[in-house]
Amino acid sequence: MKIEKLSISQVMNRDVLTVMPSTTLMQLIKLMRRTNQHMFPVIDEENNLLGIVNYRGICNIFRPFSKSVSEIVKRMPFVEAVDDEDLNLELSPEMGMLILVDDIINTTFISVKETDTIQEARRLMRLHNVEMLPVVSDKKLVGMLSLLDLFIYIFKEHDIIEK
């Protein structure tokens, strides 16, 4: 069977690291460093998917205004050059404990169902420019599907890596 026609449940990863809304910024950054992952599903106590959190959410809490506003300000002849706002942050040690995942969660995410096809998942990935999608069943997180999962499946089918 061609991979496009397979259901997501046949390819997805069920072993998913998650965080809770109460996870602190310090805990999140430690988890990102330890796992070398930049995106995590956010779940509640019943495993309901609430959203996702990623490095962009962390960056956004320190930006005084949106990137588009920043670009407009840079073009104004009477405004001095704007420093790179990603590198010139005013931080205090307390921020690591006071900022929670709940403060930076992205609740406008795209998800797929286990029964959807790989073809539909890949279409959504391209359309929304993402490489990873949460997989849900009745609002419960059941896994993740990434481009890497697709490549691994294909490589196994072609005996490039062992099954």
Image (cartoon, rainbow, N blue to C red):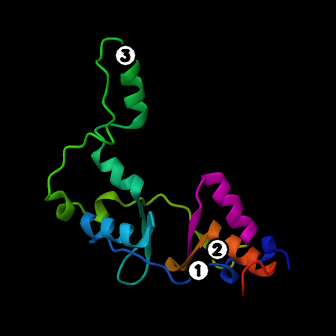
Q: Residue at x 36, y 12 (%)?
A: 77
Q: Residue at x 30, y 17 (%)?
A: 79
The part of the image, by quadrant, that contains residue 145 is: bottom right
Residues at circles 2 and 1 in contact by the CB criterion of under 8 Å: yes
| Kind of residue indicated by mark 3 | Met
Crowd band around label 1 with a 10 angstrom C-alpha radius: few (<14), some (14–19), many (20+): some
List x then y, in percent, for residue 123. Answer: 71, 59
Q: Which residue is mark 1?
A: 13
Crowd band around label 3 with a 10 angstrom C-alpha radius: few (<14), some (14–19), many (20+): few
Ranked by sequence position, the earlier of labels 2 and 3 is 3
Q: Which residue is mark 3?
A: 76
Q: Secondary structure at mark 3?
A: loop
| Kind of residue indicated by mark 2 | Asp
Residues at circles 2 and 3 in contact by the CB criterion of under 8 Å: no
List x then y, in percent, for residue 127. Answer: 66, 52
CA gap, disc 2 and disc 3:
46 Å
Q: Residue at x 72, y 65 (%)?
A: 120
| Kind of residue indicated by mark 1 | Asn
Query: Where is the C terminus found, in terms of image quarters?
Result: bottom right
Ranked by sequence position, the earlier of labels 3 and 1 is 1
Query: How many marks overall?
Result: 3
Circle nearer the viewer, 2 or 3? 2
Give the residues in magenta: 118-136
